[in-house]
Amino acid sequence: MNGTTSELTDLVARLGEPGVLVLGDLMLDRYVWGDAERISQEAPVVLLRADRREERLGGASSVAMMLAALGAKVSIAGLVGGDADGLRVRAMLDGLGIDHAAVLTDAARPTTVKERYIGRAQQKHPQQMIRVDYETRECVSGELEDRLADAVVAKAMAADIVLVSDYDKGVCSPSLLPRLTAACRAAGKRVVVDPIRGGDYSKYRGMSSMTPNRLEAGLATRSSIVDGPGALAAARALRESLGLEAGIVTLDKEGMALWDSSGGSLYPVRPRQVYDITGAGDMVLAVFGLALAAGAGYPAAIRLANIAGGLEVEKIGVAPVTREEILADIARADSGPRRGKERSLEALVQELHHRRDAGQTVVFTNGCFDVLHAGHVQYLDEARAQGDILVVGLNSDSSVRLLKGPTRPVNNQQARSLVLAALEAVDHVVVFSQSTPLELIKAIRPDVLVKGADYSREAVVGGDFVESYGGRIHLAGLRPGESSTRIIQRLGAA
């Protein structure tokens, strides 16, 4: 391990269970899924035949959910309406063990709800058709604001750090935030904010740090951020104009820019398979704050937040990231950039659960893939074309020896996995040690099971199981004369 990797691993190990208060705009994200079948006879609009409805915590409550999954002791402060959606948000917070005693009910406003309608064309490839928002953006004021401020300050004094998730829905008012900041500064507690998109950041003055993205930071500093130097200039301007410990600008796939008492630094991220950017900013705030609460400096906290944000964009929708996933990702990065596609079975099953929630089709195939050749590439391309995600089950070295004899494999499983992961068609690689992939297929439950055309449907291992729940078998074409065994024989003859 290099020094940075070792430092991050040690940081995850000492995160502990810090107390984190999240203040901000609580939301309920509702998803309605269905098949977009045809154009309505009533109007020129797509008719969605709904078949599933799902609710998730959003906004500040999403940050709280992520922190709870990471092992923090979380409390949350804000407002919900006196409606059924507000009761639903409270019930979901209860289910996660999140303290919501500082969440007040405002009968004059609705609970903020974002309702998304998502259609599948030909029962695949889901697309968001429309989003309907139920909300008010009026700032909390008067007696309700005083009650909320008192509750927030009381919870902040019992926390190790305060995170502010400001979605500009009225909770983080220009008079409430300075009261919180002053109380926390007097008590020596840090306050970190994920700010609004706007030109006036005066209400954040005196906080410890903030995590605006490049567009938000550009609006706040009246600049256009197109590169690293521009981001550093904006981070410095935010720090100096608002009296922050550190100015930070998040740069999505380019990482983050930091300006603190030591000057400016850029922290790049490694390339990712980006499936959905939803929730990435919330995850960055959650892990950044958690690391600071554990005693990390700003550079280490940013590196850890970069990793967590990268893991989040590899998931569909807002989904929690665990410490175990972060540690595994650190280890994969230390082993090389392609190792990110190799998954343990447990992590893969969890990943595929999120993919199916988004209506994606999972394809599975397996093999030894000892000496990769053009026939393999053609076969895997055809397999990938059968759905949205291709999982390749790779025989372990011991499994290959059972099938091929003591002189095989020529290449060990680490090398074979690395080569497979380099192919664009392959999304995930999982190694198995049994003589057949049947147990792996039962755990993954693919929608499509692919084998070569030299098999009959009856001979495909796991075929009966896949067809039992509505899946299908696809027999992919083979490239004549191409096989690892023949290549090895030709090399031996040469």
Image: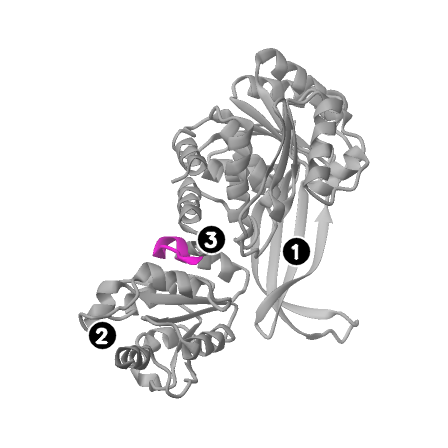
The kind of secondary structure element at disc 2 is: helix
Which tag, 1 or 2, sits closer to the chain's start? 1
Asked if marks 2 and 3 touch (Cβ < 8 Å), the reply is no
* Residue 344 among those drawn in magenta: yes
Q: Nearer the viewer, residue 456 or 231?
A: 231
Residue stretch in magenta: 341-348
Question: Which of the colour schemes (rainbow, by chain, secondary structure, one colour) is used?
Answer: one colour
The kind of secondary structure element at disc 1 is: strand
What residue would you read off at disc 3? Answer: 337
The three-letter code of the residue at mark 1 reads: Arg
Q: Residue at x 40, y 57 (%)?
A: 342
What residue would you read off at disc 1? Answer: 116
Q: Label 1 to label 2, Cα distance in Å?
A: 51 Å
Q: Label 2 to label 3, Cα distance in Å?
A: 30 Å
Q: Nearer the viewer, residue 313 or 81?
A: 313
The three-letter code of the residue at mark 2 reads: Lys
The label on residue 404 is: 2
